[in-house]
């Protein structure tokens, strides 16, 4: 190492280092870079002061602004809990008409109802509520137990043949298996039931079968399905004169119904869903029905 000297070409001092005759100039770090370094350091000091930064043994420096992500999250959770509690209380306390008139609440019903329906009901009643073999359509305006909101809420609460203390009991007897009707009587009454929703029975043999069927119906069926076959909501007996069928409306399906009986099971939701959830679902079914009828 030699002594630093002034370089005759650039006029700058050398560092005094020399490698095989090459001498290193002592060029200073550009001022701009120094300025940036200083600014960076300064801004980090400012941030340390304002925001949470340095860990200590038990805690950390909180910063003057108090912008702690944990508290921010807690605040937003609290806020959304208050919001949820608010709509739940509104749904629980307001009447069905008032809720239907409140567009914000209706939006919640659609959103929350869709999720509840998918999670709890769609596996039996289908994603669109249209039912399927053995499961009633909820959007066709044909009701076993009644379609006003209070009745639907009650069906949801206690279920049907569900084992709940207050469950609705649905009993379509096994007329064949229990030997109440002969095969001939069963066939005749099945034909009569079909004739209630379609008038396509014209031959004389049909007329004879139908009159036997009508007689059996009069004796065995009117107590639940009513004198005109339009059903009875107090016992959950379906209307047999429309063309909506839970178990099928062809002669074989009806004969199966008559032979072995039907005891549809609808679970009860008394403890599994809150009052607000059951009310949301009731409104949601109504909303689905309006969509289906458009
Ligand atoms: C395990 C299958 C199953 C599930 C799950 C189910 N249901 Fe049902 N539901 C039925 C059956 C079967 C019936 C018909 C009962 C009868 O024969 O009376 C029924 C009947 C109903 C009725 C009465 C219909 C009428 O015409 O009066 C309503 C309303 C209803 N369900 C709504 C719901 C809702 C809402 C859910 C979800 C919370 C749900 N169901 C979940 C099987 C189910
Ligand atoms: C004790 C009351 C009761 C009597 C009596 C009764 N039913 Fe029913 N019936 C019901 C109920 C309740 C259902 C619905 C069962 C279900 O959904 O699980 C039903 C369902 C049916 C169905 C199926 C409808 C569908 O949508 O698939 C047919 C068909 C039927 N009954 C015909 C008859 C005939 C015919 C008689 C007389 C021989 C008769 N019922 C007597 C209560 C009764």
Image: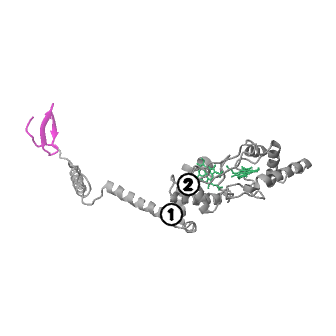
Q: Pick out the residue farthest to the left.
A: 3
Q: Position of residue 9 (x, y in %)?
A: 16, 43
Numbered label tally: 2
In this view of the protein, which residue sits in the foreground, 42 or 173?
173
In this view of the protein, which residue sits in the foreground, 192 or 214?
214
Which quadrant: the N terminus? Answer: top left
Q: Residue at x 16, y 38 (%)?
A: 24
Q: Which residue is mark 2?
A: 114
Q: Secondary structure at mark 1?
A: helix
Does the stretch in magenta take in 279?
Answer: no
In this view of the protein, which residue sits in the foreground, 5 or 192?
192
Answer yes or no: is residue 114 visible: yes
Within 10 Å of disc 1 (Cα), the crowding (few <14, some 14-19, many 20+) is some
Q: Residue at x 55, y 56 (%)?
A: 113
User: Could you tell whether 96 is left or right of 133 in the image?
Assistant: left
Quarter where residue 283 is shown: bottom right
Q: Residue at x 61, y 59 (%)?
A: 152
Q: Position of residue 151 (x, y in %)?
A: 61, 60
Q: Position of residue 267 (x, y in %)?
A: 58, 50
Q: Secondary structure at mark 2?
A: helix
Answer yes or no: is residue 284 visible: no
When the figure is inspected, residue 148 is found, relative to residue 189, above or below; the finding is: below
Characterize the magenta stretch by its predominant secondary structure. loop
Quarter where residue 237 is shown: bottom right
Q: Nearer the viewer, mark 2 or mark 1?
A: 1
Q: Which residues are magenta?
A: 1-26
Q: Which residue is mark 1?
A: 92
């Amino acid at each position: 190492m030699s002594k630093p000297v002034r370089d005759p070409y650039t006029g700058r001092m050398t560092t005094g280092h020399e490698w095989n005759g090459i001498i290193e100039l002592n060029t200073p770090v550009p001022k701009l870079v120094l300025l940036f370094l200083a600014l960076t350091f300064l801004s980090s000091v400012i941030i340390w002061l304002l925001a949470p930064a340095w860990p200590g043994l038990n805690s950390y420096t909180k910063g003057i602004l108090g912008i702690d992500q944990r508290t921010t999250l807690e605040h937003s959770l609290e806020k959304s809990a208050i919001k949820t509690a608010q709509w739940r209380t509104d749904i629980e306390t307001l009447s069905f008409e008032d809720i239907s008139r409140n567009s914000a609440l209706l939006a919640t019903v659609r959103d929350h109802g869709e999720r509840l329906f998918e999670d709890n009901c769609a596996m039996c009643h289908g994603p669109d509520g249209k039912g399927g073999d053995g499961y009633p359509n909820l959007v066709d305006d044909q009701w076993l137990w009644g379609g006003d909101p209070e009745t639907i809420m009650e069906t949801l609460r206690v279920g049907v043949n569900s084992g709940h203390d207050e469950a609705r009991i649905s009993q379509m007897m096994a007329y064949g298996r229990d030997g109440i009707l002969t095969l001939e009587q069963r066939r005749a009454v099945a034909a009569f039931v079909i004739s209630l929703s379609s008038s396509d029975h014209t031959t004389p043999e049909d007329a004879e079968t139908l009159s036997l069927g009508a007689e059996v119906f009069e004796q065995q069926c009117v107590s639940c399905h009513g004198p005109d076959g339009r059903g009875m909501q107090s016992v959950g007996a379906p209307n047999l004169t429309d063309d909506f069928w839970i178990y099928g409306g062809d002669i074989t399906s009806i004969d199966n119904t008559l032979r072995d009986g039907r005891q549809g099971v609808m679970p009860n939701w008394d403890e599994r869903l809150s009052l607000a959830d059951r009310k949301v679902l009731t409104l949601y079914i109504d909303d689905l029905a309006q969509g289906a009828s458009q």
